[in-house]
C-alpha cells in the first residue's frame, strides 16, 4: 500500500524570488557613490592641487591640500562645474583677512585659483615701494631667513620657455652637484594678528607701487604670497591685464586647511619606488 500523503492539486508551489541582476546592483552602488561624492565635494571638503608658484613659500607646485567648503557659504561655484543649482549665495559668511582661499578666477569664472585674503569690503589697499598699506596703515614686514628650495621638475630654473620657477639670479650651487634657489623672505603681520611669510625678489613697478584700491561691497582683495610672481587683485582683468582685480564673494569655494601630499615632480608612474623618493614628506600635514 502506498502510504504517501495525497497532494492537493489546487495548491501552488511556493514562489521562488528571482535573483537580482548583478548589473543592476552595481549600477545602483555607483549611482549612490556618485551622489555621496558630489555631496561631500560640494558641501563638506574637496582636494586641490597647486599648479603654480604664486603662493610660495607656503605652497609649492606639487602640493595637494584639502579645503573646507562651509566657511563662506555656498553658491553655484561650490558645485562641480559651477552647476547653476544654487541661486545667489546662501549661508554667506565673510572670510577673515589672512585666510588662504580657493576660488573661481574672474572674469571667466572657469578656473580654480588660490590666494590670500588681504582686503574685505570697504577696505583700502595699496602697495608703496613694496610695502603693503591696509586702510592707511603700513603692514609690518620683517626680514627673516631666506627661502631655500632645491631645483626640481616642479621648480625648475626660469628661461628657455620655462616660467614660474626660480629666477636665474637666485640660483646657487647645492650639495652633490645640485642647484638651490635662494629668495629673500619676509614676515607680514595683519592688524588681526594673522602672520604669514612672503617672498620679495626686488622692485617691480607695477606690483610694488600701485594705485589706491577700495574694495567694493560683496568682494574681496586677494594677493599671492610670492609677490613678484602672482597675478592677483593688484592687476586688471583681461584683456587689460592678467590679474583678477576684485573677486566676488560668491566665487569663493572654500578655505585651505591642511596639506595631505607633496611631490617634487620627480616620480615616474612605471617606477613605483620613485613615488616615495619624490615625496616631500615634511610638508604633509602642514596646516594654515
Image (tube, rainbow, N blue to C red):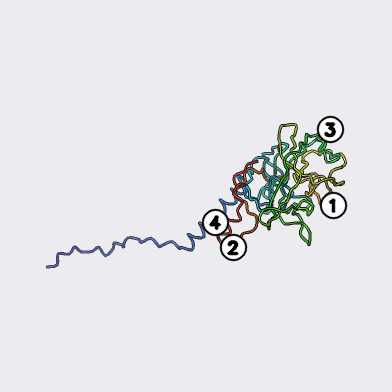
Real-space Cα separation, disc 3 to disc 1, in angstroms: 26 Å
Quarter of the image for residue 18 reads bottom left
The image shows residue 182 at horizontal and vertical percentages of 74, 48
- Tell me the SS state at disc 4: helix
Real-space Cα separation, disc 4 to disc 2, in angstroms: 30 Å
**Residue beneath the point at 46% across and 63% down:** 22
Numbered circles on residues, count: 4
The image shows residue 162 at horizontal and vertical percentages of 76, 59
Whichever of callouts 1 and 2 sits on the residue coming sooner in the sequence is: 1
Q: Residues within 10 Å of mark 4 (few under 14, many from 20)?
A: few
Whichever of callouts 1 and 4 sits on the residue coming sooner in the sequence is: 4
Tell me the residue that label 3 is attached to.
Answer: 136
Looking at the picture, tell me which residue is in the foreground, 30 or 59.
59
On residue 31, which mark appears?
4
**Residue beneath the point at 61% across and 59% down:** 267
- Tell me the SS state at disc 2: loop
Tell me the residue that label 2 is attached to.
Answer: 269
Which one is in front in this view, the residue at disc 1 or the one at disc 4?
1
Instruction: Please determine whether, in this image, residue 168 is positioned above or below residue 190.
Output: below
Tell me the residue that label 1 is attached to.
Answer: 241
Q: Residues within 10 Å of mark 2 (few under 14, many from 20)?
A: few
Q: Is residue 200 left or right of residue 43?
A: right
Amino acid at each position: 500500500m502506498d502510504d504517501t500523503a495525497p497532494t492537493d492539486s489546487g495548491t501552488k508551489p511556493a514562489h521562488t524570488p528571482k535573483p537580482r541582476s548583478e548589473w543592476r546592483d552595481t549600477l545602483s552602488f555607483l549611482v549612490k557613490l556618485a551622489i555621496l561624492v558630489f555631496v561631500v565635494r560640494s558641501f563638506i571638503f574637496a582636494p586641490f592641487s597647486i599648479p603654480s608658484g604664486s603662493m610660495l613659500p607656503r605652497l609649492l607646485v606639487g602640493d595637494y591640500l584639502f579645503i573646507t567648503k562651509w566657511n563662506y557659504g555656498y553658491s553655484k561655484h561650490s558645485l562641480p562645474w559651477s552647476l547653476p543649482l544654487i541661486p545667489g549665495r546662501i549661508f554667506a559668511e565673510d572670510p577673515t583677512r589672512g585666510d588662504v582661499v580657493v576660488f573661481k578666477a574672474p572674469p571667466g569664472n572657469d578656473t580654480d585659483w588660490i590666494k590670500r585674503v588681504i582686503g574685505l569690503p570697504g577696505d583700502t589697499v595699496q602697495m608703496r615701494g613694496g610695502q603693503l598699506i591696509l586702510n592707511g596703515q603700513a603692514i609690518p614686514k620683517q626680514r627673516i631667513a631666506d627661502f631655500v628650495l632645491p631645483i626640481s621638475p616642479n621648480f625648475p630654473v626660469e628661461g628657455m620657455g620655462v616660467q614660474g620657477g626660480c629666477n636665474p639670479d637666485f640660483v646657487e650651487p647645492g650639495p652633490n652637484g645640485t642647484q638651490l634657489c635662494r629668495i629673500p623672505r619676509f614676515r607680514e603681520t595683519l592688524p588681526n594678528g594673522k602672520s604669514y611669510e612672503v617672498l620679495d625678489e626686488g622692485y617691480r613697478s607695477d606690483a610694488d607701487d600701485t594705485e589706491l584700491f577700495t574694495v567694493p561691497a560683496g568682494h574681496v582683495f586677494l594677493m599671492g604670497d610670492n609677490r613678484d610672481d602672482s597675478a592677483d587683485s593688484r592687476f586688471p582683468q583681461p584683456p587689460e591685464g592678467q590679474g583678477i582685480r576684485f573677486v566676488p564673494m560668491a566665487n569663493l569655494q572654500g578655505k585651505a586647511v591642511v596639506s595631505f601630499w607633496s611631490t617634487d615632480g620627480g616620480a615616474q608612474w612605471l617606477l613605483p619606488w620613485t613615488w616615495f623618493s619624490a615625496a616631500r614628506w615634511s610638508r604633509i600635514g602642514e596646516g594654515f
